[in-house]
Amino acid sequence: MRISEASAEAGVSARLLRYYEEQGLLAPSRDSSGYRRYNAADLEAARRVRQLLDAGLSTATIRQVLPCLVERAGRLTPICSELVAQLKDEQERIETSISALTESRDAIASVITAADDAPLR
């Protein structure tokens, strides 16, 4: 199927499909006119990429982990032993980011609270 059909089927824009290809995350075939042709495996890969991006992984990390993931019972499941360790590292990175953002949010809340206690000009 062509990119417009694949976009609708995968639930991502045509622009994102092209971006995923540029990043080495998808490799659709090309017809004799040079148009991209997507198959069911390409669409599944696009959905997985979207899931992983939504989970906070970078495209560089996704490029590494994508070959080691399959979908089982509606969940992405690792099939390579080294993937679990890499995902644990990513999870730790995300948790560190969450902690930093929480501290920033709390600092801003403190300033707002102080503003409630002081007269404003």
Image (cartoon, rainbow, N blue to C red):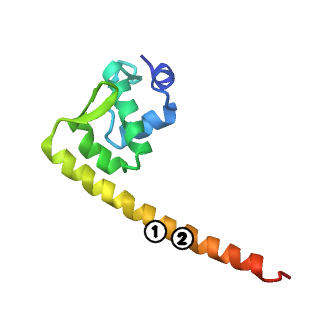
User: Where does residue 82 sit, x and y in percent of width and height?
Assistant: 15, 47
| Residue drawn at point x = 38 percent, y = 60 percent | 95
Three-letter amino acid code of the residue under disc 1: Ala
Q: CA distance from mark 2 to mark 1?
A: 6 Å
User: Where does residue 40 sit, x and y in percent of width and height?
Assistant: 34, 19
User: Where does residue 11 sit, x and y in percent of width and height?
Assistant: 49, 27
Query: Which residue is at the front of the view, 114 or 37?
Result: 114
- From the viewer's perspective, tell me whether residue 108 is left or right of residue 120: left
Secondary structure of residue under mark 2: helix
Secondary structure of residue under mark 1: helix
| Residue drawn at point x = 26 percent, y = 50 percent | 87
- Cβ atoms at labels 2 and 1 below 8 Å apart: yes
Q: Residues within 10 Å of mark 1 (few under 14, many from 20)?
A: few
Residue linked to disc 2: 104
Residue furthest front as drawn: 117
Image quarter (top left, top right, bottom left or bottom right) of the C terminus = bottom right
User: Where does residue 2 sit, x and y in percent of width and height?
Assistant: 44, 19
- From the viewer's perspective, tell me whether residue 98 is left or right of residue 62: right
Examine the rendering and report whether any part of residue 71 can be seen: yes
Query: Which residue is at the front of the view, 93 or 40?
Result: 93
Image quarter (top left, top right, bottom left or bottom right) of the N terminus = top left
Task: Count the labels in the image.
Answer: 2
Which mark, residue 100?
A: 1
Q: Is residue 103 above or below residue 88?
A: below
Residue furthest right as drawn: 121
Q: Is residue 97 above or below residue 85?
A: below
Q: Residues within 10 Å of mark 2 (few under 14, many from 20)?
A: few
Which mark, residue 20?
A: none
| Residue drawn at point x = 40 percent, y = 31 percent | 47
Three-letter amino acid code of the residue under disc 2: Ser
| Residue drawn at point x = 40 percent, y = 20 percent | 33
Q: Is residue 16 above or below residue 108?
A: above
